[in-house]
Image (cartoon, grey):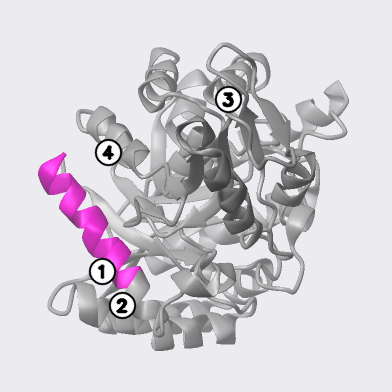
Amino acid sequence: MQRALAYCTNVHAGADLGQTVENLRQHALAVKRRVSPNAPMGIGLWLAASAARALRDPRRLTSLRTWLGKHELLPFTLNGFPFGDFHQKRVKYDVYQPNWFDQQRLVYTQDLIRALDGLLPEGVEGSISTLPISWAKPFPAPDLMERAARYLRQIAVELAELESRTGRLIYLCLEPEPGCLLQSSKDVVRFFGQFLLPGAERAIILRHLRVCHDICHAAVMFEDQADAIDRFQAEGIQIGKVQVSSAIRIDAARLSAAERVAAKGQLLTFAEDRYLHQTTVLPSENQTWEFFDDLPEALRQAGDDGLGDSQWRVHFHVPIFLDRFGLLGTTQKQIDLCINRLRQTDTRHYEVETYAWGVLPKSLQVPKLADGIAREMQWLGDRFDIC
């Protein structure tokens, strides 16, 4: 089975269509020269709501499709999670707005479907990732959950009609994330079973509504990659897209007392102000993990001796080619586990989503962003050869 690899362009700032195209010109073409100079290269295109809305204009849509084709950039997948400016000074919880209780999210997704259908060459299927309904707090009333399910079923029907009319297969993929209503595979299975499948056309739902499996997110929740994948398969829920990402990992029990203090100091350098970095702490193998909305909150709860003997997982997308840096490790090995388990499935779309390059500590940044992204793409390509 042929797999399509891409990097997600939500790493680049710019929420309108002009900035989006300029980012592709400046960064994506530079990555392509390094990774795939003589063949098409996949991109996971991020279109903020204003950019997607602008592409309602057939002339602009045709212009972008022509430009992408000329430069051999294939946007087989869209990131439909961040609605607005994903690189403003402070994003945090705003990234979950509007959620799937809000009709704006429905309209935005419809714009993305229209854009993706117009940008893709004939015969190429597309995927769109979207947020996992909403942030979990406060927990929504049942009528809101029903509304979200109604909007999602509407999308599935529209996608089925598109395929029937044009032959184009596009699927919308819910992306579980720590702290959200759908934060694990069990939550996704429960939502499909309680809200999406009852009273609906099962075949349409399962064909056009799928899962975006973010490897980092599962790792932060201490969820076994194979178990999550098997759980989806058992319920007939397809993984339409994999976001290849890596989280920060600390096994403090393996560190000396002095190293624990030093590791906490190093971790402080990742407690930045733009993005939410959900953190899960497992005191020991026999205890339940504790969840924190953001890394600074978890660090405030840590003892004076540093990190105790706990295991820490931090939702901070670090370069996937790194296994460790200083006293901190990563969940890189989870990528191999995921790829190996998906090898015999129909999952085709893989997207490197290290959007946090701009907020990494200076020691991990690169002089040219394209060099770092290209190294990630090359590393991922190698994994399919050796895993």
Q: Amino acid at mark 3?
A: Val
Q: Which mark is residue 31?
A: 2
Q: Amino acid at mark 1?
A: Met
Which residue carries the number 3 mark? 188
Which residue carries the number 4 mark? 336
For the residues bearing labels 1 and 2, Cβ distance under 8 angstroms:
yes
Residue at screen point 56% across, 30% down: 221
Q: Which residues are magenta?
A: 373-387
Residue at screen point 88% across, 33% down: 138
User: Splitting the image into 4 quarters, where does residue 154 fall?
Assistant: top right
N-term-proximal mark, 1 vs 3: 1
Mark 2 → mark 3, Cα distance in angstroms: 34 Å
Q: Which mark is residue 41?
A: 1
Mark 4 → mark 1, Cα distance in angstroms: 22 Å
For the residues bearing labels 1 and 3, Cβ distance under 8 angstroms:
no
Magenta: main secondary structure: helix
Residue 218: where, in percent of width, then height? 50, 33
Residue 192: where, in percent of width, then height? 59, 21
The nearer-to-camera label among 4 and 2 is 4
Mark 3 closeness class: few <14, some 14–19, many ≥20 residues within 10 Å: many
User: Which element type, helix, strand or loop, lies under badge 3?
Assistant: helix
Residue at screen point 46% across, 51% down: 327
The nearer-to-camera label among 4 and 1 is 4
